[in-house]
Image (cartoon, rainbow, N blue to C red):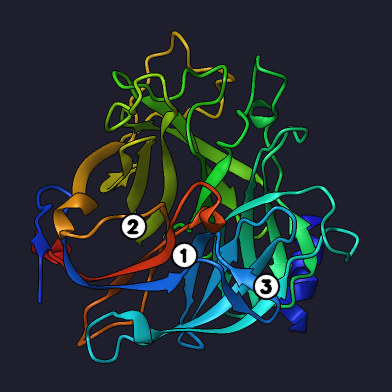
């Protein structure tokens, strides 16, 4: 079914350098500015906010950004002007909003939680993910057309299906991440933190083993799985018994077997900590055959810190989206975006953060 639907669609339609050299880690990021769109900004009778994923369309030199508004899932088209080599408030333009439709061609009634989005410029397909929510036992990865119509859904291995509190994906920590592999024939999606049977969520003293799953983008079939170790919670909450969490919120492929992993930690009374890591599946244990990794000898994905956003001299908001952008003077760019939670938990903003990518990979 996935193959036939997808086949039909195909037919129809200055600087702060941060060093991270060595082995496959030959990259640096150069900060080129921050832009903010105020929370509760209105656009075509919708509130622009909850931006949990972003991707760049190379054919149109524009962006798509998905909102995690469970009552009205939607995505926006954006222009982000980097022509002068710097990012500021005037560079963000919202151009369109599109309602995401369910399988029946109607708006959702089941309150999914959109988190990640990626563009296939030709023939105009969009891949997107949803987390597991209360009352819904499964996260998912789907394909939609540019006008928001459902086209297909990826197979989900049984181990990811939530079974109460005893197995599967925990509530609100499902598929946060989505990225292509080396090309658009494969996708990677990842849980924010461990499946119940794999281990615990992060604490102040220990990390969490999140599953990263490789998918065949043409057939919808699950392929390999790997373990990515999320760091412990960055700081103790205030008060000490307050809410705190840490998770893997986005992946982005840079080159063959090389990805940026975004980890976000939050502690009430303290705020957000966001760090970018370079990581790879190369050399990691393939774990799809294991329903649980408990008691298994597992080599997780290697990782190294690329950037701690606290080092930029700005206050990171709830940053959880990431995409490559256009080239500036031959250098790739990177855009991060935050989810303002519609300011439901206090004042927040829609924050965009820009970088140039310095690539030393070829020097090895």
Q: Callout 1 environment at 10 Å: few (<14), some (14 to 19), or many (20+)?
A: few
Q: Measured from the top left, where is residue 356 in percent x and y?
A: 22, 73
Q: Measured from the top left, where is residue 151 in percent x and y?
A: 78, 64
Q: Callout 2 environment at 10 Å: few (<14), some (14 to 19), or many (20+)?
A: few
Task: Kindly report the distance in space between the C-alpha atoms of the residues bearing marks 3 and 2.
Answer: 39 Å
Residue 123 in view, yes or no: no
Q: Is residue 116 above or below residue 62?
A: above
Instruction: Indicate which label's residue lies in the foreground, 3 or 2.
Output: 3
Q: Measured from the top left, where is residue 173 in percent x and y?
A: 55, 36
> Which of the marked residues, 3 or 1, is nearer the chain's N terminus?
3
Q: Look at mark 3 in the image and give the residue it sits on.
A: 46
Q: Look at mark 1 in the image and give the residue it sits on.
A: 183
Q: Which mark is residue 98?
A: none
**Residue at 45 percent of width and 57 percent of height:** 181
Between residues 303 and 249, which one lies in front from this camera angle?
Answer: 249
Between residues 164 and 315, which one lies in front from this camera angle?
Answer: 315
Q: At numbered mark 2, what does the secondary structure look like: helix, strand or loop?
A: loop
Q: At numbered mark 1, what does the secondary structure look like: helix, strand or loop?
A: loop
Instruction: Indicate which label's residue lies in the foreground, 3 or 1.
Output: 3
**Residue at 55 percent of width and 59 percent of height:** 50
Q: At numbered mark 3, what does the secondary structure look like: helix, strand or loop?
A: strand
Q: Which mark is residue 256?
A: 2
Q: Is residue 204 above or below residue 261?
A: above
> Which of the marked residues, 1 or 2, is nearer the chain's N terminus?
1
Q: Measured from the top left, where is residue 114 in percent x and y?
A: 63, 54
Kindly give the residue lying farthest to the top in the view shown.
295
Residue 103 falls left or right of residue 123: right
**Residue at 77 percent of width and 82 percent of height:** 12
> Which of the marked residues, 3 or 2, is nearer the chain's N terminus?
3
Q: Is residue 122 above or below residue 235?
A: below
């Amino acid at each position: 079914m996935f193959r036939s639907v997808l086949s039909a669609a195909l037919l129809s339609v200055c600087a702060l350098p941060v060093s991270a050299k060595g082995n496959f880690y030959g990259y640096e990021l150069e900060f080129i500015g921050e832009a903010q769109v105020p929370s509760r900004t209105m656009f075509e009778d919708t509130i622009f906010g909850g931006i949990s994923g972003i991707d760049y369309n190379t054919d149109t030199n524009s962006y798509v950004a998905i909102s995690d508004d469970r009552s009205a899932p939607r995505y926006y088209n954006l222009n982000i002007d980097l022509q002068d080599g710097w990012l500021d408030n005037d560079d963000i333009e919202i151009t369109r909003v599109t309602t995401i439709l369910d399988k029946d061609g109607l708006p959702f009634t089941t309150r999914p939680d959109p988190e990640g989005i990626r563009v296939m410029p030709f023939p105009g397909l969009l891949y997107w993910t949803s987390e597991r929510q209360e009352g819904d036992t499964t996260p998912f990865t789907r394909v939609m057309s540019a006008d928001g119509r459902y086209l297909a859904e990826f197979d989900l291995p049984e181990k990811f299906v939530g079974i109460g509190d005893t197995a599967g994906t925990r509530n609100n920590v499902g598929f946060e991440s989505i990225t292509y592999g080396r090309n658009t024939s494969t996708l990677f999606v990842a849980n924010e933190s461990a499946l119940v049977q794999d281990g615990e969520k992060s604490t102040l003293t220990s990390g969490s083993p999140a599953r990263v799953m490789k998918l065949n983008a043409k057939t919808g079939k699950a392929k390999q799985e790997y373990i990515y170790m999320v760091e412990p919670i960055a700081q103790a909450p205030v008060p000490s018994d307050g809410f705190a969490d840490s998770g893997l919120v986005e992946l982005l492929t840079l080159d063959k077997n090389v990805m940026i992993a975004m980890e976000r930690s939050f502690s009430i009374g303290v705020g957000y900590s966001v760090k970018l890591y370079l990581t790879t599946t190369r050399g990691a244990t393939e774990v799809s055959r294991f329903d649980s990794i408990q008691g298994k000898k597992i080599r997780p994905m290697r990782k190294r810190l690329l950037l701690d956003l606290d080092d930029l001299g700005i206050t990171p908001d709830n940053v959880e989206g990431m995409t490559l952008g256009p080239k500036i003077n031959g250098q790739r760019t990177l855009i991060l975006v935050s989810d303002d939670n519609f300011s439901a938990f206090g004042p927040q903003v829609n924050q965009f953060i820009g970088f140039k990518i310095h690539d030393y990979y070829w020097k090895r």
